[in-house]
Amino acid sequence: INIAIYFHNYYVHAPRETSQEWQYGYKQMMEWLMGQKDKYHKIIVTPAYDQPYIYSLWYGNYSPKAWVNNGEFAKSFDNFEFRSIHWNEDVSIPNTLLVGTPDEIKEPSRAIWSVNFLDGKPAFLAVPTPSL
């Protein structure tokens, strides 16, 4: 009985209840962003849940040589910038796509794309800024 309970919890409850600890949503986000990246001058992606540059290198089929590391986590390459979203300042950067958490995106109604964790809570929201 204990083994059955364990497997039930592991395969049924754990994915739904702990998807944010397993970086759920990064694959969906990066696959979507790869189709959008040529439309924007800059794409700012939050590192709130993990290290998003790893997922962009993998799902974007970038060579690791494209990623310049100064001994810290990657901060940018190509037109990606990996840092926290500062809504009041970043929303005024022209032709930029802001990809952040619901706490960072202050106007979720402007989102053109989103992905939820397996428990239904929003993981990432993508909001474009106006072009000049």
Image (cartoon, rainbow, N blue to C red):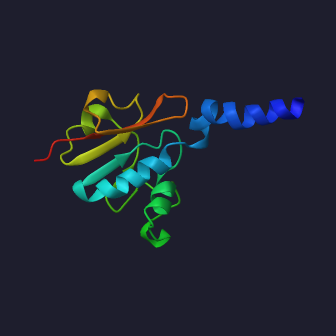
Image coordinates for residue 130, horizontal then vertical, percent: 16, 42
- Considering only vertical position in the picture, is 24 above or below 80? above
Residue 127 percent location from the top left of the image: 28, 39
Q: On the image, which quarter does residue 106 sit in?
A: top left
34 relative to 121 in the view: left or right = left
For this orientation, the residue located farthest to the left is: 132
Q: Which residue is rendered at x = 48% and y = 39% of the image?
A: 48
Question: Residue at coordinates 42% horizontally, 54% vertically from top-left?
Answer: 31
Between 124 and 35, the one nearer to me in the picture:
35
Please indicate whether residue 67 sits to the left or right of residue 118 in the image: left
- Relative image position of residue 15 (x, y in whole percent): 64, 36
Q: Is residue 100 above or below residue 56?
A: above
In the figure, is residue 14 to the left or right of 70? right
Q: Image quadrant for the N terminus?
A: top right
Q: Position of residue 81 (x, y in %)?
A: 36, 52
Residue 49 visible somewhere in the drawing: yes
Residue 103, picture quadrant: top left
Residue 79 vs residue 114, the one in the foreground: 114
Number of numbered discs present? 0
Left of 4 or right of it: where is 105? Answer: left
Residue closest to the far right: 1
Residue at figure coordinates x 27%, y 39% from the top left: 90
> Residue at point 84% right, 33% down?
4
Residue 107 makes an appearance in the image: no
Give whichever of 85, 2 is nearer the camera. 2
